[in-house]
Structure formats: structure tokens, C-alpha cells
Image (spheres, rainbow, N blue to C red):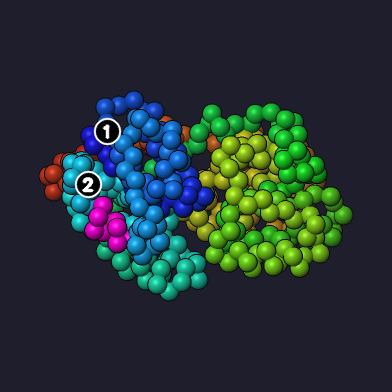
Amino acid sequence: MKIGISTSVMQRGQSGVGQYVLALVRALLAQNRHHDLTLFVLEQDVPLFAFAVPAARIVPVAEKHRSPVRNILWHQFQLPQLARELELDVLHIPSYRRMVGRKPCALVATIHDLAPFRVPGKYDWLRMVYGRVVARWLARRQDQIIAVSQFTADDIVNFFSAAPERIQVIPNGLDHARFNPGNRLAAKRQVALSHQLERPFFLYVARLEHPAKNHLRLIEAFERFKRATGSDWELVLGGSDWHGAETIHERIRLSPCAAAIRTLGFVSDAELPTLYRAADLFVFPSLFEGFGLPPAEAMACGCPVLSSARGALGEVIGDAAVRLEPESVDDLERQLTRYATDEAARADLVAAGCRRAAQFDWKRTASATLEVYSAAVIQHRLGSLPEGMRVCTYFRN
């Protein structure tokens, strides 16, 4: 099977979609099956896929096509032509924002969330219209759609009116060779050396995006925690600046606890597991997620997790994390205080989190994704799937 994957929505690897693309490509290549993989990659992103050479073909895309409008036009007009010239069997677009309408081969899209329908003000009006109107039409052109959670799958049916039989739920995975408990003392020493983090700390890994990631309420809860306890704990925010980041930075600047709030910027793949292992508590108060990898990664690294259950987060954390009410500063403060002062409770969360994280694996995700590719090819060629055909076996015991 000749498979093409567009990677230009990965935002230089500094987003959840970017991490999905990189991890999925690695796992697909590790499947060791007889498939030809072609990756369409913006020129400056090509070094991110050095690991894929020579197992995959890299087709560079000119940097002039990076901006959103130019990138959409490239996907609609040039990518289908390239897919036809390369005689691809299936083309995978790993984001609803770049789904293609022309069908030179079977089409598969991954939809991570439908935030334009769920988070008011997340995007400007033009992006909201695109997400609500144009993407809705494009979704119906796909042979198969991968949803990373049941919550997202339900949203695709409800908001896009997509046929349920064309939607397959395949959760994101974890690379357990990277994300594992490891040596906590060594991790503590490393972050003390690299970031001068020598005190206990709460960690939040997410883009600095306002209001969706809910940083302001977390900062207020942390201030209350510090006043009430006199603790020397710090709050560490890892993630690159995004929409509304200036609001978060200004709030930190004005905080009476500014000296105890650290922003690290984008955390590299190599450093991220170490940061999780060194953290004393991982806090994830996001207002909405279509999946939410950071809580699962933190659990895999042996870090106790306090998390919102909004969107698909409840599916990810199960009963292995403390569920936060993200819009209640009182609840955030109460949970920060309780678990910062109760080492035994944190140990219970660590054990539960490790068990939960074991359920997510990129090998299973890649295997199920290949099944979806095969089904999409059959559907494209025949017009429909054979009656009774089961597409994805991810949830089969």
C-alpha cells in the first residue's frame, strides 16, 4: 500500500498535533510491513523527520506554503495532484483544518477535536467559520475519519453530521521507551542543573494559550495556596507561546508570587520525560481537550496527576487522577493544598497512574491506523465497505 501523510499542520512539532504526527510516523515505520510511506514536509521541518530516512520518502514543500491560507490552498489544489502523480493508494491528513476535497485516492483524516464548536473565542472569526462550515463539508468527503477519543467521535457525528460507520476511535499512544518512571532522583538533579528547579514544584505542560488552557485560574489558585501554606513550592509552566500568551505573561508579572512561577517555553522531546519525573505534582486544568496527552505522559513517568475531566480528558485519566473543577479557583486551591501536603495520597496516584498509562501505546495506535488505511482504500474503490466488515480492531480483546 502506498501511503501519503501531510505533515504541514505540525507547527514545527511544538503542538499536540505535531507530537501526534511524529509519534505516528515512528510507529508506522516500526511496523515493518510492506508499505511505501511518503511524507509531505515543509522545508524547514524536514530535519524533524531525519529518523524516517531512508525508510520513507520525504517530499519537501516550499516554505511559502506555511501560512494558513497558502497552506489550505496547497492542500486543496497541489497536494491532490502530487498524490495522483505518486500513485498513492491513501492520503492521510492528520487535522481537520487541512482536509482535502478532491479525491485522487482514498482519503483519511484524523480529527483531534472540534474546538470551534466547544470553546468560544478560541480562534478569530475567519478560523471559526472555516472550522464550522468548510471543514464540515470536507469531512463528508473523507473515506474514513480517525477520532482520537469517543468524545471527539461523538462531536464529529453531532456537529459535522458525518456517518458513524466512517468514524473510527483510535486513541493517541505513548512511547513507553521514553515515558516511564525512570530515576526520580537523577531527574531532580538534572532539572536543578538545567532550570535551577531545586524546590518542590507543580508542573503544567501546555501551550500558553488563553483562555482555553486556563492558566489564569491556576495562577490565582497557586497564589492562594502560597498565602495559606507559606510553602516553598513553585509553579512551572512548560509550553510555547500561543494565542493570548501575552495575557498569561502579564498576569505572572503582576503576581505577588511571580518569583515562584517559572515559564520554560517549549520543552523538547528529550527533556520532557525528565521534567515529568522531577515534578512533585502534575496539574492539568484545561477547559477543553480532544484527547490530552500530557496527563497520560505524566502518569507514565510516575508523576501524580490532578486534571480537569473536560472534553475527552475523563476518558484519558479514568480513575487514576484527581478530577479538578477547572472553573473553580476554590477547588483548584483545595486540591493543590491537599496533595502537596499528603505524600501518601501522591503515592497512591503514582501507582494508579502507571497502570492507566500502560493502556496507551503507539504500536497499537499505528496498527489500528493501518487497518483504517486499508478500509479506506476498499471504500474508495468499491464505493462502500462490504456489509459486516469491521474496520478497526483497536478495542478488540
Q: Say few, some or many: other residues with alpha carbon within 10 Å of mark 2 (under 14 / 14 to 19 / 20 or more).
A: many
- Quadrant housing the C terminus: top left
Task: Say whether residue 77 is magenta.
Answer: yes
Up-down: is 219 above or below 341?
Answer: below
Q: Position of residue 39 (x, y in %)?
A: 33, 42
Q: Amino acid at mark 1?
A: Asp
Question: Within the magenta stretch, is there residue 142?
Answer: no
Q: Residue at x 35, y 30 (%)?
A: 54
Q: Quadrant of residue 386?
A: top left
Label 2, on which residue?
Answer: 83
What is the x, y in percent for residue 180? 59, 31
Is 351 left, or right, of 197 in this rendering? left
Question: Residue 301, position in %: x, y?
Answer: 62, 35
Left or right, residue 41 beside residue 140: right
- What residue would you read off at disc 1? 36
Q: Residue at x 43, y 56 (%)?
A: 113
Residue drawn at (13%, 48%) of the image: 383
Toward the bottom, the furthest residue is 125
